[in-house]
């Protein structure tokens, strides 16, 4: 039979283990009827338009903030990246800080708020081909990618998807 002190320690271990797991899970995804939050808890309050992000990048190395976007594409492999429309017709590539969370693969065509850091980077041919494969493009389409691309990239620490 176990002693009282061993039982007490075992009980404490179980309580704290469950609490830590619950806290970690709540940071990864909180779902309600209106919104789903992934990564760090963020809200729509204070979000700027994607146009202001685009304008602020001119002449700056990076821009930090919270922005409203329309999701156009999502990685169909894991949900580990997404793309959003920019005012000039191009798309911004969005990844998630430290690869610590993903978004649902069916998030395309939804509105969202993202918080993090944007910059203009050159994406290599290999990366572009990888993203095309993740997006479910055909091998013919992937083979047509032969040039690197300068694009707006965003590393999000939190994403709030508006459920429509």
Image (spheres, rainbow, N blue to C red):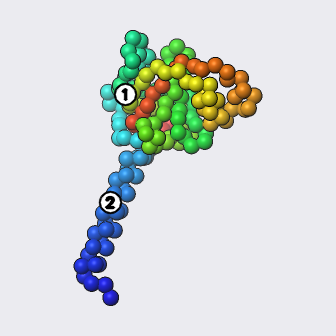
- Which quadrant of the structure image shows residue 52? top left
In x, y percent, where is residue 120?
46, 19
- Distance from the alpha carbon under mark 1 to that under mark 2: 30 Å
Image point 43% across, 22% down: which residue?
119
> 126 or 162: which is nearer to us?
126
Image point 65% across, 34% down: which residue?
133
How busy is the neighbourhood of tag 1: few (under 14 within 10 Å), some, or many (20 plus)? many
Confirm whether residue 36 shows in the render.
no
In x, y percent, where is residue 35?
43, 40
Image point 53% across, 21% down: which residue?
122
Residue occupied by mark 2:
19
**In which quadrant is the N terminus drawn?**
bottom left
> 136 or 41: which is nearer to us?
136
Check the image and report above or below for 34 versus 54: below
In x, y percent, where is residue 104?
53, 42
> 139 or 79: which is nearer to us?
139
Image point 39% across, 36% down: which residue?
157
Element type at mark 1 = strand
| In this picture, residue 75 sits left or right of residue 98 | right
Task: Tell me the number on the disc at residue 115.
Answer: none
Element type at mark 2 = helix
Confirm whether residue 83 shows in the render.
yes
In x, y percent, where is residue 105?
57, 40
User: What residue occupies the far top of the structure in this picture?
Assistant: 59
How busy is the neighbourhood of tag 2: few (under 14 within 10 Å), some, or many (20 plus)? few
Q: Which badge, 1 or 2, is on the more N-terminal residue?
A: 2
Q: Total number of numbered labels?
A: 2
Check the image and report above or below for 133 versus 11: above
Residue occupied by mark 1:
66
| In this picture, residue 148 sits left or right of residue 9 | right
- Which quadrant of the structure image shows residue 98? top left
User: What residue occupies the far left of the structure in this picture?
Assistant: 5
């Amino acid at each position: 039979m176990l002693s009282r002190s061993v039982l007490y320690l075992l009980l404490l271990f179980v309580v704290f283990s469950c609490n830590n797991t619950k806290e970690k899970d709540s940071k990864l995804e909180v779902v309600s009827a209106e919104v789903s939050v992934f990564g760090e808890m963020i809200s729509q309050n204070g979000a700027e338009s994607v146009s202001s992000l685009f304008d602020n990048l001119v002449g700056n190395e990076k821009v930090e903030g919270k922005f409203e976007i329309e999701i156009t594409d999502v990685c169909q492999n894991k949900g580990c990246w997404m793309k959003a429309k920019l005012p000039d017709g191009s798309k911004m590539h969005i990844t998630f800080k430290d690869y610590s969370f993903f978004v649902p693969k069916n998030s395309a065509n939804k509105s969202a708020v993202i918080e993090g850091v944007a910059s203009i980077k050159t994406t290599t041919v290999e990366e572009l081909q990888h993203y095309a494969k993740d997006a479910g493009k055909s091998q013919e389409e992937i083979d047509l990618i032969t040039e690197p691309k300068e694009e707006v990239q965003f590393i999000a620490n939190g994403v709030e998807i508006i459920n429509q």
